[in-house]
Amino acid sequence: MQNYVQIENAGMVFSTRKGRFTALTGINLNVGQGEFITLIGHSGCGKSTLLNLVAGLLDASDGVLLLANKEIKGPGPERAVVFQNHSLLPWLTAFENVHLAVEKVFGGRETRAQLKARTRAALDLVGLGHAAAKLPGEISGGMKQRVGIARALAMEPKVLLMDEPFGALDALTRAHLQDELMKIVAATESTVIMVTHDVDEAVLLSDRIVMMTNGPAATIGEILGVDLPRPRERLQLAHDPHYSALRSQVLEFLYRRQMRPQEAA
Amino acid sequence: MNTVTLNDRSLSVVMDAPETEVIPTPAAPTRRTPYFETESGKRFLEGTLNLFRNAIPPVLGIALFVALWALIANTGGKIPGPAETWGAAIALFSDPFYDNGPNDQGIGWNILNSLTRVGIGFGLAAAAGIPLGFMIGRFAFLNQMLSPIIGILRPVSPLAWLPIGLLVLQKAEPASIWVIFISSIWPMVLNTAAGVQRIPQDYMNVARVLNLSELKVFTRILFPAVLPYVLTGVRLSIGVAWLVIVAAEMLTGGVGIGFWVWDEWNNLNVAHIIIAIFVVGIVGLLLEQGLMLVAKRFSYE
């Protein structure tokens, strides 16, 4: 598989008041075009930091990050981010929130009517065409997160970065959105890097699961290929022995090899 | 209303029911339900009752205040009582816009002149203070540079600025506007800066990922996010401005509510001074309430 996102020997050191803190070290990862990657690990293992490096919201202290053979310098719309807490602007409607992104990316090349059509299409894709005129305060958490996904997808990014996008949602809404995301990703052939702490979510969605060791100085502990055929069906997988085996491999890594550090520190 | 009509069937149900069943009260079918027993009538009654319940404490407070005032007026003798003041107020407000030369004008002219000064001074302060607040909030360097100066200038009593104004501007009118300006600018600067500093990092991350231009960042993120803070600053500022105008006018003269108070003191017309106090208070309250309405209109929470 062609290397689309290349992370070579990346490290991240934060300078804090207590001195230098090494969050990540020696990260090497290649992501192919159209691949779905999840980053999983205990909290504080730097998985969000790694995502922010790819997003360009943070600058790596060491190493190089490339997207389509170009070095990643700063954030940009070709690496759209779905934030954990949706980060919609509360004074703009769902439509306006998505349109802000559409306008920025396609504004120079397309007519107003085309831009509006793009915005509507993105909202329709996540099933929120009817809620376009609603403000974020007027819709549920799951709907807000879907608007966030629509905003990211509407930019037609090279890579879709998702930082625990369903972490704040209840289990039923989460399952529903996971199913929708699988359909959308299959239809758009997006390249996705997603941070999660949910083992089932990781196995269900990923082509490969990147398991991270505990911080500080976290790195990639193991990469697990998920060779389950697509489209994947949640209910069938529940009885699939191969699914269970993959799931226990992740659990094994997280709870035996990387025991959650005691809260003493 | 639950009106129960009895017919043979319902009667038999009632008759056959065991003793423990709730027996429907037989309502007189021909009587029209009185208005206060209908839904809308009940709502009306409820609403009126609530209105009274909410009105009782403030009305009681004002009544006590007036009674206390009357008591003091009766014992002291120098202060006019409520009735006398009320009479003077009616005489005064029956002709608010007469003009007998610069030292004798109607109360309406005095209020309008003061409001104009406050408007100009406050407007200038907003025009300078809000952009300054944005810049202080956005650039930490500027913040650190200016915070000691603001720290020193902000607590200075407004009237201490008057001599500087008179010296530089030479005239009384612009000097009092200057005093309004310099004393009402700080709440707007500080609140705007605080608002900019408290913008959630998430919003700025959105701006960065989208690569928005500075203009778009300002119009779509900074301005709407900070607007509620700005309006709080504006509200505090207009309060300060109105507070200061009376004192400034007392010193500078001219037509205005503050000078009018001083003039009436020289005339020993105490009733008019008390009226002026009420006028100042009520106008200040209206200014503040008006801005509260505007602020509510723009809050997105």
Image (spheres, coloured by chain):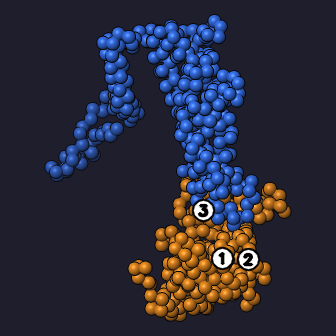
Q: Residue furthest left?
A: B19
Question: Which of A255/B235 is in front?
Answer: B235
At 51% from the left and 21% from the top, the residue drawn is B279
Which residue corresponds to mark 1? Answer: A53
Name the residue type under label 3: Gln
In this rendering, the answer to whether A60 lies above or below B28 is below
Residue A173 image point, x, y percent:
51, 69
Residue B247 image point, x, y percent:
54, 25
At 55% from the left and 54% from the top, the residue drawn is A138
Q: Secondary structure at mark 3?
A: helix
CA gap, disc 2 to disc 3? 21 Å
Same chain letter for marks 3 and 1: no
Residue A158 image point, x, y percent:
74, 76
In this rendering, the answer to whether B10 lies above or below B66 is below
Which residue corresponds to mark 2? Answer: A72
Callout 1: 10 Å neighbours few (<14), some, many (20+)? many
Q: Quadrant of residue B127?
A: top right
Q: Chain of mark 1?
A: A
Give the colour of chain B.
Answer: blue
Among the chains pictured, the one given orange colouring is A
Relative placement, left or right, of A125 versus B213 is: left
Which residue corresponds to mark 3? Answer: B201
Quadrant of the image containing the N terminus of chain B = top left
Circles 2 and 1: CB distance less than 8 Å? Answer: yes
Relative placement, left or right, of A151 versus A174 is: right
Specify whether residue B31 is in view.
yes
At 65% from the left and 37% from the top, the residue drawn is B125
Name the residue type under label 2: Ile
Callout 3: 10 Å neighbours few (<14), some, many (20+)? few
Specify whether residue B111 is in view.
no
Sequence-wise first label, 2 or 1: 1
